[in-house]
Amino acid sequence: MPPPDPSLIDIADLAVALGTDLDRGLDAAEAATRLRADGPNELRALPPVPAWRRALAQLQDPLVYLLGAAAAVALAAWWFEGRCRDGVAGWPLDAIVIAGVVVLNAVLGWLQEAKAAKAVAALAKMTTATSAVLRDGAVARVPSAELVKGDVLVLAEGDAVGADARLAQAAALKLLEAPLTGESEPVLKDAVALPATTALGDRLNMVFKGTAVAQGSGRAIVTATGMQTEMGGIATLLDTTPDAPTPLQVEIAHLGKVLGIAALVIAAVVVATILLISDIHGVADVVTVLLLGVSLAVAAVPEGLLAILSVVLAMGVRRMARHHAIVKKLASVETLGSASVIASDKTGTLTRGEMTVQRVMTASGRTDITGVGYAPEGRAEAAGAELPEGALRAELQAVLRGGSLAGNAQLQQDDSGAWTIQGDPTEAAFLVAERKLGHQESAAESAPEWSERFERIGEIPFTSQRKMMSVLVVDHADGDAHVLLSKGAPDVLLAHCTHARRGEATVVLDAALRAQVLADVAAMTGDALRTLAVARRSLAADAQIPADASAAAALEQELEYLGTVGIIDPPREEAAVAITQARQAGIRVVMITGDHPRTAARIAADLGIVDAGAQVLTGIELDKLDEAAFTAAALQTSVFARVAPRHKLRIVRALQGGGNVVAMTGDGVNDAPALKAADIGVAMGIAGTEVTKEAARMILADDNFATIVLAVREGRGVLDNIRKFLRYLLSSNLAEVLTVFAGVVGAGVIGLKATATGAGGAVVLPLLATQILWINLITDTGPALAMGVDPIADDVMARKPRRRGQRIIDASMGLGVLEAGVVMAVLTLLTLDLFLPGGLIEPVESWLGAGPHSLELARTAAFTVLVLTQLFNCFNARSASASAFRAAFSNRWLWAAVALSAALQVAVVHLPFLNLAFGTVPLSAAQWCVCVAMASGVLWFSEGRKLLRRRWTRRAPAPLEPPASHRPREQGRP
């Protein structure tokens, strides 16, 4: 068995412990035995969720349970009272509508998750990984899933590392470990045993599953496979990290409980009150009262809420998809809008993941290279102006030419025009910079001419001890001159130099010039630039690289120093703009990376996350903190470096514990546990690993951090619109409940009982059950859905995010709902009284016309007024403080929905077959005018209330949702 940390033990002792031979590897029979014992080298995969279970999961919601109970009660009421009626009135319409809403909601949620899963699958890599190993003394390539402990890996440039392994040999071996550790630069490996346990990113004698060889070669003994690898440890951490519900899911669950309690209370109060004040003559009257209480309880539940919520969220998903954001779960759309902290990985997320030469220091001074990434677009500048011909340009050409030739990377342009590299990204940075300078023409066809001029005939490889490498080339354009080109750490390479290039001349590298070079290097290091120096030496025409290492190293003396380049993985320009927008929106951006602290601080300062010189905490420093100090550090520090996956997870949880809604972005496997624990995890679609995409709730198809800020804006707009239609739906349903309840209780006051001929002491309803159902059908769905596509306000990103735990329906909104509901109910009952004799208000013939004022006419007028008050109220509900006349025409869909609902109400009043089904009678033009005037009262009441509120709260903080926009930037479409 290997020791707990194989990096600490001598390789020969480790080989004995694992029963393997460094020269022959394992034999095939032993490898098969170990494979049977330990199992395949695979991460534990969860079985796919069947479609039927995903469909049932859509029904696991408190609001769905409430609607299901309402449907069951409505069906029971129909069975006892309505199934014997003729026509439409004999159908269980309430139960049918509620069931349809539940099914529609489930279908929408299921389709969205299926669509997101398909998008994730389209991004997945479909290749089967293989590894080169020694088996029976020969190199064989086997599926990585068949690797076992003790296998000897044979590593070469471009290989994916199939398992965790301890290096036995390393020749200029560099690995890309960004997916696991977040390190932006290739890591130079060394086979020497470590003196003490170090952080994962500093275990230089280990290679890890999921990383890749950027350069060089090596051999390593497999020490862990499957779930025992570092990658497996992350998978275990991921499995034990629960899926937290989104803030919106928490709010909807709370709303479902509140509505359920409200429905029970309404039923109990209604039944008790009517039994106390009415003359009950028998069991039939008791059953009538009980059914009335049940009907009002069902009416209190907004049946369309769940479906409308799903449709609005689905439209938000579609809009986000246009911005290259794939949302996996509908409720996650709103979560980004509530985010108060965006915790982001650095490499590939905030930076481009493309090493770029940014600065070159030579004997004559400093040159800056513009442009970022692998596209050779940019120029050389001195003091902000294009670099002219002269000594500085000549020196720059020599440095970039030497650095390009002293490397093995390749720069290519694919058929789509995108530039890609093969090999070490640092070496590729020289090629890109050289093309920007124009020394090698940007046209692809010039590459063969360049390769024909310089012929490499030998190489002295890079090692961790030497910290430099050299190549011997023949320059066929200069009389077949033999030139040794060297590249390495500046302090090391400078020790091999005796001269320096100044312009076209060679000068002695005296103490003053040497001190200047070292100062230049120190300045670049202080700016978090990775420094590489380049030197050259002219050799004899028959020079060759000796096979003996000592003799070869002797050639690397008396070199001519050419200059030093500063390289960095540059920040994304769009990320800087997005971070500025996020800060303006009250969102704190936190960088959490496995990269070097100095690099993290530089990138964070460049992007505006922190000021220069801000504190950076490392994983080792975090481990020394107790829980309270750790939480305080997470809430106060904005840059964390050299952190492990467990640190990222703790930081996210500490931020959540501090009351923040956390969005976590990342691309590496090391980010996956934190992504899953965050309120919304955001994975990179291009550079992201499959594990990360699976753990995330949203995927950026373009790997652009700026897309997150666009999604935040969409999320805030969705939240605003959710509050609008909640305000509308709840006030409308409350108005219906209050109208029926107060109408029954106060029947004698408004003339309802006196007009009901032959009613005696029986309960007389101000509105029929079919009329209430009609109101829900035509006013709840269309206008509420149209509010869901209200334009996003201009100031949506100028407001602070919603606090964690802050209710969507807060006290202020609850009061507004109550006021609107009461006013609509009062207006409806006043209309009923106005059309009935014997109440508070006697009918006015000049308004209502002469003739008998029947109960059917009064009900029709009250029914119409209740519909119209709700249509007026939908304009009020667009804002808690702004006038309904402000930007009144910015949402054309709302006007269309209102017009359709009004037309349907005209139809139910005047079409004979609908008169029969819904108990209505036609209204005259004068009566219609009275109804419209009465209904408009809710608009004028709301305008007065908002005016007072604006005056009282002029200096108070802005409300949670903005007023309707003057200049909507975006118009949704249902």
Image (spheres, grey):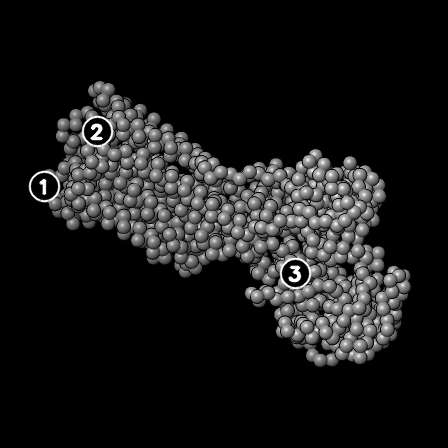
Q: Position of residue 925 (x, y in %)?
A: 16, 49
The foreground one among 800 and 952 is 800
Residue at 78% x, 36% y is 1
Q: Find the distance from the CA under tag 3 to the CA under tag 1.
A: 86 Å
* Tag 1 secondary structure: loop
Comes first in the chain, label 3 or label 1: 3
Q: Where is residue 42 in the image (x, y as percent from the top left)?
A: 65, 41
Q: Position of residue 40 (x, y in %)?
A: 66, 39
Specify the label residue 230 is tagged with.
none
Quick one: label 2, few (<14), some, or many (20+) residues within 10 Å? few
Amino acid residing under circle 2: Cys
Comes first in the chain, label 1 or label 2: 2
Residue at 38% x, 41% y is 104
Report the residue marked by disc 1: 851
Report the residue marked by disc 2: 84
* Tag 2 secondary structure: loop
Q: Where is residue 652 in the image (x, y as percent from the top left)?
A: 61, 43
Of discs 1 and 2, which sits in the foreground?
A: 2
Image quarter of residue 449: bottom right
Note whether 697 is above or below 968 in the view shown.
Answer: above
Quick one: label 1, few (<14), some, or many (20+) residues within 10 Å? few
Of discs 3 and 1, which sits in the foreground?
A: 3
The foreground one among 324 and 606 is 324
Question: Is mark 3 in CB contact (under 8 Å) with mark 1?
Answer: no
Image quarter of residue 395: bottom right
Question: Is mark 1 in CB contact (under 8 Å) with mark 2?
Answer: no
Report the residue marked by disc 3: 354
Amino acid residing under circle 1: Gly
Residue at 29% x, 42% y is 777
Comes first in the chain, label 2 or label 3: 2
Q: Find the distance from the CA under tag 2 to the CA under tag 3.
A: 75 Å
